[in-house]
Amino acid sequence: MIIKTLGLLAYEESLEKMKRFTLDRSKLTEDELWLVEHPPTYTLGLKTKPEHVLNHGHAIPLIQSDRGGQITYHGPGQIIAYTLLDLRRLNLTVRKTVRLLEQVTINLLSSLGIVGYGDDARPGVYVKGKKIASLGLKIKNGCSYHGVALNVDMDLKPFDNINPCGYDDLRVTQLKELNVNLSVEEVQQLWINQFILSFSGEIF
């Protein structure tokens, strides 16, 4: 597996890069993990309904994505882990992949003394009822792209303008609110470490 840290990258650019990588890959192409941050951006999953956009305005772009799920917000201080995996080669179902990615984040939180958990009805990772990490995938020709967004130290106010992931009662949190004062770069490395551990039997 090739692991890349790409820094701050426009959402549209990363989406096109993922699409191109997935389209061009062969059965021999190594899987890749990309760690990025995005400028302030709302992204619409394939199941997004107009009523979930409460007060968009035009200061933050609203971009249609091809991932599953509904609307969410990305911004600096949030790490995005894009997982470009050949699920057929790895003998992984979509459901198992989602659960593994949730577990990576749950394990990271546990290493920091935080109890996180998943929800079968609402993919992602939660802490005390608040969402700390969103998850959405796209599967094309048996290969995945998109991935996980973990809130580290960001401006959470833009979440007030939407129903995050389509739920009007859903609140969000981040590591900083949980008294974790690590940089994005430090959390990225911790997430990579947990990814390697969780997927070691599948990929490495």
Image: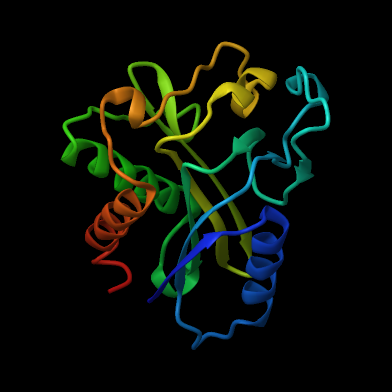
Q: Give residue 134's position: percent from left, percent from top.
A: 50, 37
Going by the image, does 127 lie left or right of 21?
left
Q: Give residue 91's position: percent from left, percent from top.
A: 41, 67
As drawn, 47 above or below 101: above
Q: Residue placed farthest to the bottom in the image?
A: 28
Q: Give residue 88's position: percent from left, percent from top.
A: 48, 70
User: Can you tell which quarter of the image residue 12 is in?
Assistant: bottom right
Going by the image, does 136 lie left or right of 5?
right
Name the quadrant of the C terminus.
Answer: bottom left
Residue drawn at (31%, 59%) of the image: 192
User: Can you tell which quarter of the image residue 146 is in?
Assistant: bottom right
Q: Nearer the viewer, residue 136 or 88?
A: 136
Coloring scheme of the render?
rainbow
Q: Nearer the viewer, residue 65 or 7?
A: 7
Q: Give residue 115's position: percent from left, percent from top.
A: 23, 27
Residue drawn at (62%, 34%) of the image: 72
User: Can you tell which quarter of the image residue 13 is in?
Assistant: bottom right
Name the quadrant of the N terminus.
Answer: bottom left
Going by the image, does 48 lie left or right of 85?
right
Residue drawn at (19%, 37%) of the image: 112
Residue drawn at (24%, 66%) of the image: 200
Q: Nearer the viewer, residue 135 or 179?
A: 179
Q: Nearer the viewer, residue 204 or 183?
A: 183
